[in-house]
Image (spheres, rainbow, N blue to C red):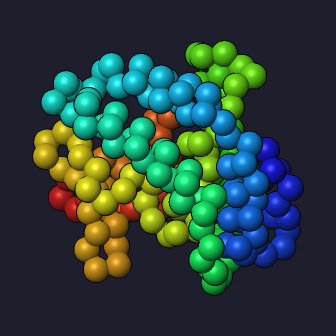
Amino acid sequence: MLVNYLDFEGKISKMDLIAILKEEAKQVHINDFIKTCSFLIKSMEHVHPKYREEYIKMYTEGYLKGYKDVKNDKTTYEGYVDNNVLNEAIVLLKKQEKLIEDEIGSGTRSFKPYMILSLYTTFVLDEPVHPVGTPFPGGYRVRKKQDVYYCPVKENNENNPFAVCGFCIAEQEPDM
């Protein structure tokens, strides 16, 4: 993965990161999306049927739209990423990739769209991994109030090996 070539000893600009993510996106093929979406559908088997279809639709459309957004993003981003948080995110995503490869087989790039979009939204766009409006059981949703993003399930998933809550910029929804 090209992010292995980031210089964590120096400053990493958002423009450096997006350039690498665009290169990564060029290596993603439709089969990767099919495998990613197939894994997503399988992983949603435990989700309450009331939410399952909406999640699957939202995530599959989100992957395709996000992929297109990364490849076509021509915005000039100011500033630098937090090297420590970015490195921790990459380490976590690599662990998750290994767990998924153990489940669906290695030698695939099915995890790459997820990695690209997680890093893009968090470190380039400064947005949470789950978009505003993402529904969760109990009628709760990811929301934005002023300049702060809130997630209703962040604290419940911080130790989940498949969650990206550890580096997501959303804060735990108060009073949850």
Total count of labels: 0
Is residue 148 visible in the rendered image? The answer is: yes
Q: Position of residue 70 (x, y in %)?
A: 59, 59
The picture places residue 107, in percent across and down from the top left corner, at: 75, 22
Horizontal arrangement in the rendering, residue 51 relative to residue 62 (left or right): left
Q: Residue at x 35, y 78 (%)?
A: 147
Of 138 and 17, nearer the camera is: 17
Q: Relative to 32, is 156 on the left or the right?
A: left
Q: Residue at x 71, y 73 (%)?
A: 15
Residue drawn at (19%, 39%), measured in percent from left and top? 137
Query: Residue sitting at 25 percent across and 31 percent down?
Result: 53
In the rendered view, would you say 98 is above or below 71?
A: above
Left or right, residue 9 beside residue 22: right
One can see residue 156 in this view: no
| Residue 153: image location, x then y, percent | 30, 47
Q: Where's the N terminus, which quadrant?
A: top right
Identify the image quadrant of residue 14: bottom right
Q: Pinpoint residue 79: horizontal percent, then vertical percent.
A: 65, 82
Which residue occupies the foreground of this view, 174 or 24? 24
Residue 1 versus residue 88 in the image, above or below: above
